[in-house]
Amino acid sequence: MTSNPTEAQVMEALSHVIEPELHKDLVTLNMIRNLKIDNSVVDFTVMLTTPACPLRNQIEEEAMAAAMTVPGVKTVNVSFDASVPGDRRLLSKMDIGVKNAIAVVSGKGGVGKSTIATNLALALAQTGAKVGLLDADIYGPNIPLMMGVHERPRAANERILPPQGYGVKLMSMGFLVEEGTPIVWRGPMIHSALRQFISDVDWGNLDYMVVDLPPGTGDASLSLVQSLALTGAIIVTTPQEVALADVVKSIAMFQLKDLQVPVLGVIENMSYFVCGHCGERTEIFSHGGGKTVAERMGVPFLGEVPIDPVVRVGGDSGQPVVVAEPESPAAIAINEIAAKVAAAISVQNISSPLPVEFKTDPDLPILNP
């Protein structure tokens, strides 16, 4: 007669299941929760490090197979939850309720940086993560248009309450100035405005804050990096040489000794076009340069996003492509990139030693625009 399985036996079996990105077993990582055994039926929850985990199916299959090796087990039910690990430097230095801050940048304008930032934030939110989107592109604040949100922020308890679009909390200079009004500011004013967007906004509890930085390596970009302990940066480029030259400069900026922001990877946007009528692929801006420059600079290549008219239509209408056309090639590519980014952040936060000390500049005044 076979005895009923025990919790110790099941946990021992699961200790041989390796999390494929963290390279440690599920038990050591404390990812097994709510283990229950009812005669021959085993139930447990796997606590993922991100709801966007790209290897969820693999983990499920291997965990079920391991539990089934325990004598007496006939049925295994696996459920999932997620607890996103936070950037220890960010959490220790800034009490703003944000676990991870991701900057989306480009060396030059016109490469679709804001489009990528918007859809990346939405892709993360659609997995169940709590996400905010900070439009730090002071001179060209396009996020309100792309997200279809035009209400002005409200205030409560001396904090700014960010508007929301598709479940994502938003803040942008575009909410605060009249349409068509030029923003003619010098460096200290930009720095102060960005600090207010970070510290005076009631962001709540966010797993990820996606930050849309202005193109280039000027005042606004440096001010943001000095004001917020960034978890990492994503570089957006198009394939042609004139854009790729600026990618090198952007990566070099984040690798400066006084900044040392991890570069999570490079995205090649507008990578190619596939005709909707004949299916012929055309590489309008060349192809493959993003991957080449990522390899040359020693940073990850996150993927290619094709040119697709639905991306432009969605951005103009306030219905981003990952929401409006989730089965389109562009949306699928962005969702895959979002999963890679979330996984990379989890690995970085769990596996890496404490980052270098984050230095802020507390002497600049707070601007009241």
Image (cartoon, helix red, strand yellow):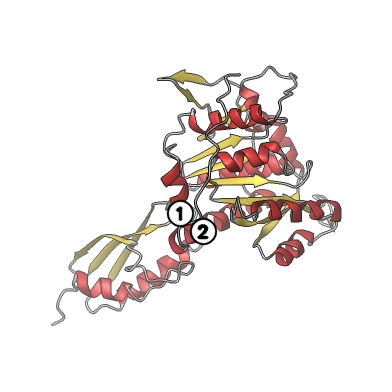
Q: Disc 1 versus disc 2: distance between alpha carbons?
A: 7 Å
Give how far across and how far down residue 325 sits, in percent: 65, 43
User: What secondary structure is found at the residue carrying circle 2?
Assistant: helix
Q: Which mark is residue 50?
A: 1
Is residue 128 visible in the rendered structure shown here? no
Foreground residue, 39 or 225? 225
Question: In the rendered view of the protein, which quadrant contains the C terminus?
Answer: top right
Q: Position of residue 83 (x, y in %)?
A: 39, 52
Q: Residues within 10 Å of mark 1 (few under 14, many from 20)?
A: many
Q: Quarter of the image holding residue 176?
A: top right
Residue at image location 59% in from the left, 56% down from the top: 262
Left/right placement of residue 142 relative to residue 128 reads right
Position of the N terminus by quadrant = bottom left
Which residue is more in the foreground, 342 or 68?
342
- Please give the name of the residue rendered at 17% of the width and 68% of the height, measured from the top-left corner: 39
Residue 189 relative to residue 161: left or right: right
In contact (CB < 8 Å): disc 1 and disc 2: yes
Q: Position of residue 130 (x, y in %)?
A: 46, 41
How many other residues sit within 10 Å of disc 2, few (<14), some (14-19) or many (≥20)? many
Say left or right for 314 vs 273.
left
Q: Earlier in the sequence, mark 1 or mark 2?
A: 1
Residue 39 higher or lower than 2, as above or below? above
**Mark 1 residue type:** Thr
Q: Seen from this angle, which residue lies furthest top?
A: 178
Check disc 1 and report its element: helix, strand or loop.
loop
Residue tagged by mark 2? 343
